[in-house]
Amino acid sequence: MRTDRFQMVATVATCLMILGIPLFPRPLAPGLDIVTVLVPVALLGAVFLLRIRGLDEIPYRDFGIAATLFLLWALVSILAIGTHTGELLTWARYLSYFLLIPAVGLVATPPRDRRIILWALVIAGVGSSLYGFYQYVNPSIMYDTFKTSATIQVRIYSTFDNPNFFSEFLLLTICGSIALFGLYWKRSRAACATIVGALLIQLLALFLTYTRGSLIALAAGLVVGVLVFRPKLLAPLAALIVVVGALPPVFSRMMGVFSGDGSTMFRIGLWKAALTAIAQKPLFGGGLGDFLQIYQGVVLRHPELYQGVTQFEPHNSYLQIAAETGVIGGVLFFCAVASLVWAGLRLSRRLKGERRLLFQCAALLAGVTGIVLNALTSDSFQHPHAIVYFFVMGGLLIGLGQGRWKPPQVFGSSLVLKKLLGRGSS
Protein backbone atom coordinates (compact mmCIF):
# COMPACT_ATOMS: atom_id res chain seq x y z
CA MET A 1 0.00 0.00 0.00
CA ARG A 2 2.83 2.37 0.90
CA THR A 3 4.63 1.48 -2.34
CA ASP A 4 1.49 2.30 -4.36
CA ARG A 5 1.24 5.68 -2.65
CA PHE A 6 4.87 6.57 -3.41
CA GLN A 7 4.45 5.29 -6.97
CA MET A 8 1.47 7.58 -7.48
CA VAL A 9 3.34 10.60 -6.08
CA ALA A 10 6.35 9.93 -8.32
CA THR A 11 4.16 9.52 -11.41
CA VAL A 12 2.25 12.73 -10.66
CA ALA A 13 5.53 14.62 -10.17
CA THR A 14 6.84 13.34 -13.52
CA CYS A 15 3.62 14.28 -15.34
CA LEU A 16 3.62 17.69 -13.67
CA MET A 17 7.06 18.32 -15.15
CA ILE A 18 6.02 17.09 -18.61
CA LEU A 19 2.84 19.17 -18.72
CA GLY A 20 4.15 22.23 -16.92
CA ILE A 21 7.28 23.07 -18.89
CA PRO A 22 5.51 24.32 -22.08
CA LEU A 23 3.25 26.58 -20.00
CA PHE A 24 6.08 28.83 -18.76
CA PRO A 25 8.34 29.90 -21.65
CA ARG A 26 9.73 32.91 -19.78
CA PRO A 27 11.94 32.83 -16.66
CA LEU A 28 10.00 32.80 -13.41
CA ALA A 29 12.68 35.08 -11.94
CA PRO A 30 16.18 36.19 -13.02
CA GLY A 31 18.19 32.99 -13.51
CA LEU A 32 15.24 30.75 -12.58
CA ASP A 33 13.17 29.00 -15.24
CA ILE A 34 10.46 26.35 -15.03
CA VAL A 35 12.86 23.51 -15.90
CA THR A 36 15.03 24.38 -12.91
CA VAL A 37 11.94 24.15 -10.71
CA LEU A 38 10.16 21.09 -12.07
CA VAL A 39 13.06 18.71 -12.79
CA PRO A 40 14.02 18.57 -9.07
CA VAL A 41 10.33 17.92 -8.28
CA ALA A 42 10.38 14.88 -10.57
CA LEU A 43 13.70 13.71 -9.13
CA LEU A 44 12.41 14.07 -5.58
CA GLY A 45 9.37 11.97 -6.40
CA ALA A 46 11.64 9.23 -7.73
CA VAL A 47 13.86 9.37 -4.62
CA PHE A 48 10.89 8.62 -2.36
CA LEU A 49 9.98 5.71 -4.62
CA LEU A 50 13.56 4.46 -4.55
CA ARG A 51 13.48 4.34 -0.75
CA ILE A 52 10.71 1.74 -1.05
CA ARG A 53 11.77 -0.14 -4.16
CA GLY A 54 15.48 -0.49 -3.35
CA LEU A 55 18.85 0.44 -4.82
CA ASP A 56 19.11 -2.68 -6.94
CA GLU A 57 16.33 -1.35 -9.17
CA ILE A 58 18.47 1.51 -10.49
CA PRO A 59 18.53 0.49 -14.17
CA TYR A 60 21.12 0.10 -16.89
CA ARG A 61 24.72 0.22 -15.76
CA ASP A 62 26.30 1.11 -19.14
CA PHE A 63 24.44 4.40 -19.37
CA GLY A 64 25.42 5.27 -15.81
CA ILE A 65 29.09 4.72 -16.56
CA ALA A 66 29.07 6.93 -19.66
CA ALA A 67 27.16 9.77 -17.96
CA THR A 68 29.32 9.60 -14.82
CA LEU A 69 32.55 9.81 -16.82
CA PHE A 70 31.31 12.89 -18.68
CA LEU A 71 30.20 14.62 -15.49
CA LEU A 72 33.52 13.86 -13.78
CA TRP A 73 35.52 15.17 -16.73
CA ALA A 74 33.35 18.29 -16.97
CA LEU A 75 34.00 18.94 -13.28
CA VAL A 76 37.74 18.44 -13.80
CA SER A 77 37.70 20.89 -16.71
CA ILE A 78 35.91 23.51 -14.57
CA LEU A 79 38.49 23.14 -11.80
CA ALA A 80 41.36 23.18 -14.30
CA ILE A 81 40.43 26.52 -15.87
CA GLY A 82 39.28 28.16 -12.63
CA THR A 83 36.02 27.61 -10.81
CA HIS A 84 33.13 29.94 -11.66
CA THR A 85 29.64 29.84 -10.25
CA GLY A 86 28.01 29.91 -13.70
CA GLU A 87 29.99 26.90 -14.88
CA LEU A 88 29.13 24.92 -11.74
CA LEU A 89 25.45 25.75 -12.22
CA THR A 90 25.65 24.52 -15.80
CA TRP A 91 27.29 21.33 -14.54
CA ALA A 92 24.45 20.89 -12.02
CA ARG A 93 21.95 21.29 -14.86
CA TYR A 94 23.57 18.46 -16.83
CA LEU A 95 23.69 16.36 -13.67
CA SER A 96 19.93 16.81 -13.20
CA TYR A 97 19.31 15.87 -16.84
CA PHE A 98 21.24 12.62 -16.55
CA LEU A 99 19.66 11.77 -13.20
CA LEU A 100 16.28 12.18 -14.84
CA ILE A 101 16.88 9.06 -16.96
CA PRO A 102 17.12 6.51 -14.12
CA ALA A 103 14.46 8.47 -12.20
CA VAL A 104 11.90 8.28 -15.01
CA GLY A 105 13.01 4.70 -15.71
CA LEU A 106 12.19 3.77 -12.13
CA VAL A 107 8.81 5.53 -12.19
CA ALA A 108 7.86 4.15 -15.62
CA THR A 109 8.61 0.51 -14.83
CA PRO A 110 4.96 -0.44 -14.11
CA PRO A 111 3.01 -0.53 -17.44
CA ARG A 112 0.17 1.54 -15.98
CA ASP A 113 2.46 4.40 -14.97
CA ARG A 114 4.36 4.21 -18.24
CA ARG A 115 1.02 4.62 -20.03
CA ILE A 116 0.15 7.66 -17.90
CA ILE A 117 3.49 9.32 -18.65
CA LEU A 118 3.07 8.67 -22.38
CA TRP A 119 -0.40 10.25 -22.27
CA ALA A 120 1.16 13.28 -20.58
CA LEU A 121 3.65 13.53 -23.46
CA VAL A 122 0.83 13.36 -26.02
CA ILE A 123 -1.21 16.04 -24.21
CA ALA A 124 1.84 18.32 -23.98
CA GLY A 125 2.55 17.82 -27.69
CA VAL A 126 -1.02 18.46 -28.81
CA GLY A 127 -1.48 21.47 -26.54
CA SER A 128 1.73 23.09 -27.77
CA SER A 129 0.79 22.31 -31.38
CA LEU A 130 -2.61 23.96 -31.04
CA TYR A 131 -0.98 27.12 -29.74
CA GLY A 132 1.42 26.94 -32.67
CA PHE A 133 -1.56 26.86 -35.05
CA TYR A 134 -2.91 29.95 -33.30
CA GLN A 135 0.43 31.64 -34.01
CA TYR A 136 0.24 30.59 -37.64
CA VAL A 137 -3.11 32.31 -38.20
CA ASN A 138 -2.13 35.29 -36.02
CA PRO A 139 1.54 35.92 -36.87
CA SER A 140 1.36 39.40 -35.38
CA ILE A 141 1.61 37.87 -31.89
CA MET A 142 5.04 36.41 -32.74
CA TYR A 143 8.15 38.42 -31.95
CA ASP A 144 9.78 36.99 -35.07
CA THR A 145 8.07 35.18 -37.95
CA PHE A 146 11.31 33.41 -38.94
CA LYS A 147 10.51 34.05 -42.59
CA THR A 148 12.88 32.04 -44.80
CA SER A 149 11.59 32.60 -48.34
CA ALA A 150 8.67 33.86 -50.40
CA THR A 151 6.94 30.48 -49.98
CA ILE A 152 7.60 30.19 -46.22
CA GLN A 153 6.33 33.33 -44.54
CA VAL A 154 5.81 31.96 -41.02
CA ARG A 155 7.57 29.27 -38.97
CA ILE A 156 5.70 28.49 -35.76
CA TYR A 157 7.50 27.97 -32.46
CA SER A 158 4.64 27.75 -29.91
CA THR A 159 6.10 28.43 -26.43
CA PHE A 160 9.65 27.32 -27.29
CA ASP A 161 11.01 30.67 -28.60
CA ASN A 162 12.47 29.12 -31.74
CA PRO A 163 11.13 26.76 -34.44
CA ASN A 164 14.21 24.54 -34.07
CA PHE A 165 13.56 23.83 -30.39
CA PHE A 166 9.82 23.39 -30.91
CA SER A 167 10.50 20.88 -33.69
CA GLU A 168 12.83 18.90 -31.40
CA PHE A 169 10.12 18.80 -28.74
CA LEU A 170 7.61 17.60 -31.35
CA LEU A 171 10.01 14.95 -32.64
CA LEU A 172 9.99 13.44 -29.17
CA THR A 173 6.27 13.77 -28.47
CA ILE A 174 5.46 12.28 -31.88
CA CYS A 175 7.55 9.21 -31.09
CA GLY A 176 5.98 9.06 -27.63
CA SER A 177 2.56 9.10 -29.31
CA ILE A 178 3.57 6.21 -31.55
CA ALA A 179 4.74 4.25 -28.50
CA LEU A 180 1.38 4.89 -26.81
CA PHE A 181 -0.42 3.68 -29.94
CA GLY A 182 1.43 0.39 -29.53
CA LEU A 183 -0.04 0.01 -26.04
CA TYR A 184 -3.61 0.20 -27.38
CA TRP A 185 -3.26 -1.56 -30.74
CA LYS A 186 -6.03 -4.20 -31.04
CA ARG A 187 -7.17 -3.31 -27.52
CA SER A 188 -9.11 -0.05 -27.85
CA ARG A 189 -10.28 1.45 -31.14
CA ALA A 190 -11.31 4.68 -29.44
CA ALA A 191 -7.87 5.16 -27.88
CA CYS A 192 -6.14 4.31 -31.17
CA ALA A 193 -8.31 6.82 -33.05
CA THR A 194 -7.57 9.51 -30.45
CA ILE A 195 -3.83 8.87 -30.67
CA VAL A 196 -3.88 8.94 -34.48
CA GLY A 197 -5.65 12.31 -34.34
CA ALA A 198 -3.06 13.58 -31.87
CA LEU A 199 -0.28 12.33 -34.15
CA LEU A 200 -1.69 14.18 -37.15
CA ILE A 201 -1.93 17.42 -35.16
CA GLN A 202 1.70 17.13 -34.03
CA LEU A 203 2.95 16.15 -37.48
CA LEU A 204 1.25 19.19 -39.02
CA ALA A 205 2.82 21.40 -36.37
CA LEU A 206 6.24 19.88 -37.09
CA PHE A 207 5.68 20.53 -40.78
CA LEU A 208 4.89 24.20 -40.03
CA THR A 209 8.17 24.68 -38.19
CA TYR A 210 9.96 23.99 -41.51
CA THR A 211 12.98 22.80 -39.55
CA ARG A 212 15.11 20.71 -41.88
CA GLY A 213 17.26 19.07 -39.23
CA SER A 214 14.31 17.79 -37.20
CA LEU A 215 12.40 16.55 -40.24
CA ILE A 216 15.44 14.60 -41.42
CA ALA A 217 16.18 13.39 -37.88
CA LEU A 218 12.61 12.15 -37.41
CA ALA A 219 12.76 10.29 -40.71
CA ALA A 220 16.10 8.72 -39.74
CA GLY A 221 14.82 7.80 -36.29
CA LEU A 222 11.70 6.16 -37.74
CA VAL A 223 13.87 4.18 -40.15
CA VAL A 224 15.87 2.83 -37.19
CA GLY A 225 12.65 2.04 -35.33
CA VAL A 226 11.16 0.18 -38.28
CA LEU A 227 14.36 -1.80 -38.79
CA VAL A 228 14.29 -3.10 -35.21
CA PHE A 229 10.53 -3.76 -35.22
CA ARG A 230 9.63 -5.04 -38.69
CA PRO A 231 12.11 -4.40 -41.54
CA LYS A 232 9.55 -5.19 -44.23
CA LEU A 233 7.78 -1.93 -43.33
CA LEU A 234 10.82 0.03 -44.50
CA ALA A 235 9.58 0.29 -48.11
CA PRO A 236 6.23 1.95 -47.26
CA LEU A 237 7.96 4.24 -44.76
CA ALA A 238 10.49 5.27 -47.41
CA ALA A 239 7.64 5.97 -49.84
CA LEU A 240 5.91 8.16 -47.24
CA ILE A 241 9.14 10.07 -46.57
CA VAL A 242 9.57 10.70 -50.31
CA VAL A 243 5.97 11.96 -50.63
CA VAL A 244 6.39 14.38 -47.70
CA GLY A 245 9.75 15.53 -49.01
CA ALA A 246 8.20 16.25 -52.42
CA LEU A 247 5.70 18.76 -50.99
CA PRO A 248 6.71 22.15 -52.49
CA PRO A 249 7.52 24.05 -49.25
CA VAL A 250 9.44 21.08 -47.81
CA PHE A 251 11.26 20.39 -51.09
CA SER A 252 12.22 24.06 -51.44
CA ARG A 253 13.47 24.16 -47.85
CA MET A 254 15.52 20.98 -48.25
CA MET A 255 17.06 22.12 -51.52
CA GLY A 256 18.32 25.22 -49.73
CA VAL A 257 20.99 23.01 -48.13
CA PHE A 258 22.53 22.25 -51.53
CA SER A 259 22.13 25.76 -52.90
CA GLY A 260 24.08 27.19 -49.97
CA ASP A 261 21.33 29.39 -48.52
CA GLY A 262 22.09 31.88 -45.77
CA SER A 263 21.18 29.51 -42.93
CA THR A 264 23.43 26.74 -44.25
CA MET A 265 26.45 28.96 -44.80
CA PHE A 266 25.94 30.62 -41.43
CA ARG A 267 26.01 27.21 -39.72
CA ILE A 268 29.17 26.20 -41.57
CA GLY A 269 30.82 29.41 -40.37
CA LEU A 270 29.77 28.65 -36.79
CA TRP A 271 31.21 25.14 -37.04
CA LYS A 272 34.52 26.54 -38.27
CA ALA A 273 34.65 28.88 -35.29
CA ALA A 274 33.84 26.02 -32.89
CA LEU A 275 36.55 23.83 -34.41
CA THR A 276 39.02 26.71 -34.07
CA ALA A 277 38.09 27.06 -30.40
CA ILE A 278 38.60 23.32 -29.87
CA ALA A 279 42.00 23.45 -31.55
CA GLN A 280 43.05 26.34 -29.26
CA LYS A 281 42.08 24.56 -26.02
CA PRO A 282 41.77 20.85 -26.83
CA LEU A 283 42.28 19.45 -23.33
CA PHE A 284 39.99 21.32 -20.92
CA GLY A 285 38.15 23.70 -23.24
CA GLY A 286 37.09 27.24 -22.45
CA GLY A 287 34.49 26.63 -19.73
CA LEU A 288 31.27 24.64 -19.46
CA GLY A 289 28.36 26.82 -20.55
CA ASP A 290 30.67 29.62 -21.73
CA PHE A 291 30.48 29.13 -25.49
CA LEU A 292 29.15 32.63 -26.18
CA GLN A 293 32.31 34.10 -24.67
CA ILE A 294 34.46 31.44 -26.35
CA TYR A 295 32.96 32.30 -29.74
CA GLN A 296 33.48 36.00 -29.16
CA GLY A 297 37.15 35.43 -28.40
CA VAL A 298 37.58 33.33 -31.54
CA VAL A 299 36.04 35.85 -33.96
CA LEU A 300 38.01 38.71 -32.38
CA ARG A 301 41.26 36.79 -32.92
CA HIS A 302 40.18 35.50 -36.35
CA PRO A 303 38.30 38.24 -38.22
CA GLU A 304 37.88 35.94 -41.21
CA LEU A 305 35.40 33.90 -39.13
CA TYR A 306 33.28 36.93 -38.26
CA GLN A 307 29.72 36.66 -39.64
CA GLY A 308 28.08 39.77 -38.30
CA VAL A 309 27.63 38.59 -34.71
CA THR A 310 30.11 38.42 -31.84
CA GLN A 311 28.15 35.96 -29.70
CA PHE A 312 26.36 32.90 -31.03
CA GLU A 313 26.02 29.19 -30.39
CA PRO A 314 27.50 26.71 -32.89
CA HIS A 315 24.35 24.81 -33.93
CA ASN A 316 26.08 21.55 -33.06
CA SER A 317 25.77 20.35 -29.46
CA TYR A 318 28.81 18.07 -29.62
CA LEU A 319 31.12 20.77 -30.99
CA GLN A 320 29.85 23.10 -28.29
CA ILE A 321 30.55 20.64 -25.48
CA ALA A 322 34.00 19.92 -26.94
CA ALA A 323 34.79 23.65 -27.13
CA GLU A 324 33.65 24.07 -23.52
CA THR A 325 35.20 20.95 -21.91
CA GLY A 326 37.84 19.79 -24.40
CA VAL A 327 37.91 16.93 -26.87
CA ILE A 328 37.66 14.29 -24.14
CA GLY A 329 34.58 15.99 -22.70
CA GLY A 330 32.95 16.18 -26.12
CA VAL A 331 33.58 12.49 -26.81
CA LEU A 332 32.32 11.44 -23.37
CA PHE A 333 29.16 13.52 -23.75
CA PHE A 334 28.41 11.95 -27.13
CA CYS A 335 28.97 8.50 -25.64
CA ALA A 336 26.63 9.31 -22.75
CA VAL A 337 23.68 10.30 -24.95
CA ALA A 338 24.44 7.72 -27.66
CA SER A 339 24.48 4.98 -25.01
CA LEU A 340 20.70 5.34 -24.94
CA VAL A 341 20.59 4.38 -28.61
CA TRP A 342 22.74 1.37 -27.79
CA ALA A 343 20.43 0.55 -24.89
CA GLY A 344 17.42 0.63 -27.20
CA LEU A 345 19.12 -1.62 -29.75
CA ARG A 346 20.11 -4.11 -27.05
CA LEU A 347 16.63 -4.08 -25.58
CA SER A 348 15.02 -4.64 -28.98
CA ARG A 349 16.98 -7.89 -29.35
CA ARG A 350 15.69 -9.09 -25.99
CA LEU A 351 12.06 -8.30 -26.87
CA LYS A 352 11.87 -10.22 -30.15
CA GLY A 353 9.12 -12.48 -28.84
CA GLU A 354 7.08 -9.67 -27.28
CA ARG A 355 5.67 -7.66 -30.18
CA ARG A 356 3.79 -5.05 -28.19
CA LEU A 357 6.81 -4.20 -26.02
CA LEU A 358 9.06 -4.32 -29.06
CA PHE A 359 6.82 -1.78 -30.81
CA GLN A 360 7.09 0.59 -27.85
CA CYS A 361 10.85 0.09 -27.74
CA ALA A 362 11.14 0.87 -31.46
CA ALA A 363 9.10 4.08 -31.12
CA LEU A 364 11.08 5.33 -28.11
CA LEU A 365 14.34 4.39 -29.82
CA ALA A 366 13.26 6.41 -32.87
CA GLY A 367 12.86 9.52 -30.72
CA VAL A 368 16.16 9.07 -28.90
CA THR A 369 18.03 8.39 -32.15
CA GLY A 370 16.39 11.36 -33.84
CA ILE A 371 17.57 13.84 -31.20
CA VAL A 372 21.10 12.40 -31.09
CA LEU A 373 21.27 13.02 -34.85
CA ASN A 374 19.46 16.35 -34.71
CA ALA A 375 22.08 17.68 -32.28
CA LEU A 376 24.58 17.58 -35.16
CA THR A 377 22.90 20.66 -36.67
CA SER A 378 21.29 22.28 -33.61
CA ASP A 379 22.11 23.35 -30.07
CA SER A 380 19.67 20.69 -28.89
CA PHE A 381 21.30 19.79 -25.57
CA GLN A 382 21.91 23.40 -24.55
CA HIS A 383 18.27 24.53 -24.44
CA PRO A 384 16.38 23.04 -21.52
CA HIS A 385 12.70 23.49 -22.40
CA ALA A 386 12.79 21.00 -25.27
CA ILE A 387 15.70 18.74 -24.39
CA VAL A 388 14.28 17.70 -21.02
CA TYR A 389 11.91 15.49 -23.01
CA PHE A 390 14.86 13.60 -24.50
CA PHE A 391 15.88 12.50 -21.02
CA VAL A 392 12.27 11.65 -20.18
CA MET A 393 12.12 9.47 -23.29
CA GLY A 394 15.45 7.89 -22.38
CA GLY A 395 13.96 7.08 -18.97
CA LEU A 396 10.89 5.52 -20.59
CA LEU A 397 13.15 3.36 -22.72
CA ILE A 398 15.19 2.26 -19.70
CA GLY A 399 12.03 1.62 -17.68
CA LEU A 400 10.61 -0.51 -20.47
CA GLY A 401 13.61 -2.80 -20.12
CA GLN A 402 13.43 -3.09 -16.34
CA GLY A 403 14.27 -6.66 -15.35
CA ARG A 404 16.28 -7.09 -18.53
CA TRP A 405 19.26 -4.95 -17.49
CA LYS A 406 21.98 -6.11 -15.14
CA PRO A 407 21.72 -3.69 -12.18
CA PRO A 408 24.97 -2.03 -11.03
CA GLN A 409 25.96 -3.98 -7.93
CA VAL A 410 28.06 -1.08 -6.66
CA PHE A 411 24.82 0.75 -5.86
CA GLY A 412 23.28 -2.19 -4.08
CA SER A 413 26.36 -2.65 -1.85
CA SER A 414 27.03 1.04 -1.16
CA LEU A 415 26.70 1.82 2.54
CA VAL A 416 26.81 5.56 1.79
CA LEU A 417 23.88 5.41 -0.60
CA LYS A 418 21.95 3.15 1.77
CA LYS A 419 22.38 5.63 4.59
CA LEU A 420 21.37 8.55 2.37
CA LEU A 421 18.20 6.72 1.47
CA GLY A 422 17.55 5.68 5.04
CA ARG A 423 17.79 1.96 4.39
CA GLY A 424 20.32 1.12 7.09
CA SER A 425 23.64 -0.68 6.70
CA SER A 426 22.44 -4.24 6.59
Image: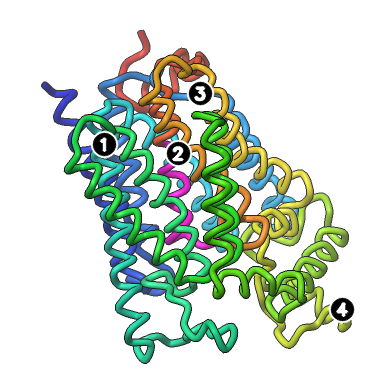
Q: Secondary structure at mark 4?
A: helix
Q: Nearer the viewer, residue 275 or 136?
A: 136
Query: According to the image, label 3 marks what residue?
Result: 347
Q: Is residue 184 above or below residue 128?
A: above
Amino acid on which the number 2 mark rests in the picture: Leu
Q: Can residue 371 be seen at all in this image of the molecule? A: no
Which is the main secondary structure of the residues drawn in magenta?
helix
Q: Secondary structure at mark 1?
A: helix
Q: Is there CB contact under 8 Å for labels 4 and 3? A: no
Question: Which numbered disc flags the more N-terminal residue, 3 or 1?
Answer: 1
Residue shown at 72%/71% (left/top)? 267
Quadrant assignment, res 69: top right
Query: According to the image, label 4 marks what residue?
Result: 301
Residue found farthest to the bottom:
140
Q: CA distance from mark 3 to mark 1?
A: 19 Å
Residue 25 magenta: no
Query: According to the image, label 1 marks what residue?
Result: 115
Amino acid on which the number 4 mark rests in the picture: Arg
Q: Can residue 178 be seen at all in this image of the molecule? A: yes
Neighbour class for label 4 at 10 Å: few (<14), some, many (≥20)? few
Q: CA distance from mark 4 to mark 1?
A: 53 Å
Residue shown at 56%/55% (left/top)? 381
Q: Position of residue 45 (x, y in %)?
A: 27, 39
Q: CA distance from mark 2 to mark 4?
A: 44 Å
Question: Which numbered disc flags the more N-terminal residue, 4 or 3?
Answer: 4
Query: According to the image, label 2 marks what residue?
Result: 364
Q: Position of residue 303 (x, y in %)?
A: 87, 83
Question: Which numbered disc flags the more N-terminal residue, 1 or 2?
Answer: 1
The range drawn in magenta is 382-395
